[in-house]
Image (cartoon, coloured by chain):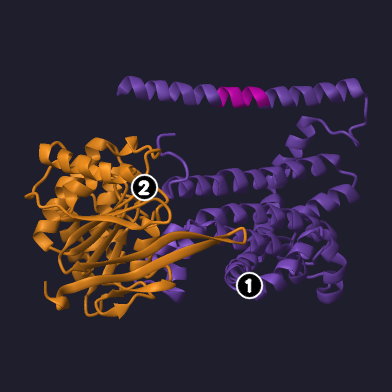
Chain colours: A purple, B orange
Amino acid sequence: MKCRLLLLNLNVVKSLLKKIAYVLAILFTWQCAYILGGCSDLIFPTPVQVARFLWHACADGTLISAIWMTIKRLILGYSVSVLIGIPVGMLCSRFYILNAFVGKLVLGLQTLPSICWVPLTLLWFGQTDRAILFVVTMGSLWSLIASTESSVRQIPSLYIKAARTMGSRGIDLWVTVIFPAALPFIITGMKQSWAFAWRSLMSAEIYVSTIHGLSVGQLLHYGREMQAMDQVVGIIFVIIAIGFIAEKVIFANLERTLHKRWGFVKSAS
Amino acid sequence: MPETNVKICASHVGKAFRRDHRFIKVLDDISFSIQTGEFVAILGPSGCGKSTLLNMVAGLEPCEEGHIIVNEYHTDQPERHRMMMFQEAALFPWYNVLGNVVYGLRFKKGLTNAERKTIALYYLRMVGLDHFERAYVHELSGGMKQRVALARALAPNPQILLMDEPFSALDALTCEQLYKDVQKIWNMQHKTVLLVTHNVREAVVLTQRVIVLSQRPGKILKDLPIQLPYPRSVHDVSVSALANELINVLHEKDDVYNYASCT
């Protein structure tokens, strides 16, 4: 037991060291490219400059409050998408007429890059938080409706058959069987639409500068305006990090847990 | 036999599916009646329409030709006095074992949640799964899943149990154990059971009467009472003899049909 624990620890340490080595290699290549390329650091900052920017931005609190502002918007806008998208998607899978109508609308609006909503939303809402939330919701809602609709159609009919023999009908059947049976597929759809929401939010924050409070997208925008390349690159790293944590850590784990419990993968793995 | 004791009565039942603008007849002029408390098997090769027949008895599929009467009523809707088991356990992975068994009890009126739980635990003990009530579906073996499905079907105390090849996906050893347990439970409760299977020995081991269907379109070839004393085992000589007799019935009609999987 002790031996196995030690072995486990060794493996963890090994993979951690590997990851650190990868990061160091990337930073090294970056520094080399800076030295060999001969660009001015106004155009191409060094890793040290970016690190220094991130350190100062964290220390004076701007970065933390900007991240908080951005995440708050993301959660708010995305929640609206989820609250509308999942019920509408489920209704679409049930009612053919609704699907024929909403389906076409969804297909059309889904292909529209979310940044195209910016001019419209600026005229409707002005430079406000609501404008940003609108873009986020429009960016993620349509894909969520489409994926929820197809999720419900994917569930094994055996579940419904079994539930019907046990007396479940109508709303009860939807709440106790159809929705939970579709949940793993719905989560996959949610992951995808979250990615859309995140991309939409970044476009919106760059183009819609609100008066109160700084956000991550705005920091990026100001970085460009002030010719502060270290800030631009630093913020890009922050954006990557937030996206990575949400997608690969939160959603991927949720997806894996559900798929395992719903029996889509063998639990041995 | 007194007429009032008839639980399930099928008369001149037929069914056709439409495929590529053609009608394919799957069931042809099926008539039988099953007494209250009788354990009957419908035996037939794959694709003979026996599952379709069971679905019609369950009320999951409409009966277009002829009619099926259960408890003196036509079957056009699933009802809770007829519970069903499927080839796959069809347990809901979003509930644990206890939750699955309680599911069928939710619509029983006049029960408190605590009573539902007590009933569910009683049936889980009956199928040999006490202490597993907190387990999740993906943690169970195939045999255990079918045991939970059996407990779930029995818990609402239905008058009729419909079994759609519930043992066909299990290994031989698990099957033997389940045959023993099903016999024991049937002897305790004497419910009306209709079992659909393509396994000849399974039919002989479990039931009191075997209705043999032909290949598509399914017709009744033979209605054979099995008068062996319970408990039976697949290894009994008398069981083998009857199984052979039934295999011969199936082979007479169709020599080409390979029945190797059923011996």
Residue in the image at 66% along x and 75% along y: A97
In which quadrant will I find the C terminus of chain A? Answer: top left
Protein chain holding label 2: B
Q: Which mark is residue A78?
A: none
Protein chain holding label 1: A
Cα–Cα gap, marks 2 and 1 = 38 Å
Q: Which residue is mark 1?
A: A96
Specify start and end residues of the magenta stretch as a single range: A16-22
Q: Quadrant of residue B105?
A: bottom left
Graded by Cα atoms within 10 Å as few (under 14), some (14 to 19) or many (20 or more), the crowding at tag 1 reads: few
Residue in the image at 39% along x and 48% along y: B46
Q: Which mark is residue B45?
A: 2
Q: Is residue A185 left or right of residue A200?
A: left
Residue in the image at 28% along x and 61% along y: B162
**Figure disc tally:** 2
The overriding secondary structure of the stretch rendered in magenta is helix
Question: x%, y% of residue A31?
Answer: 80, 24
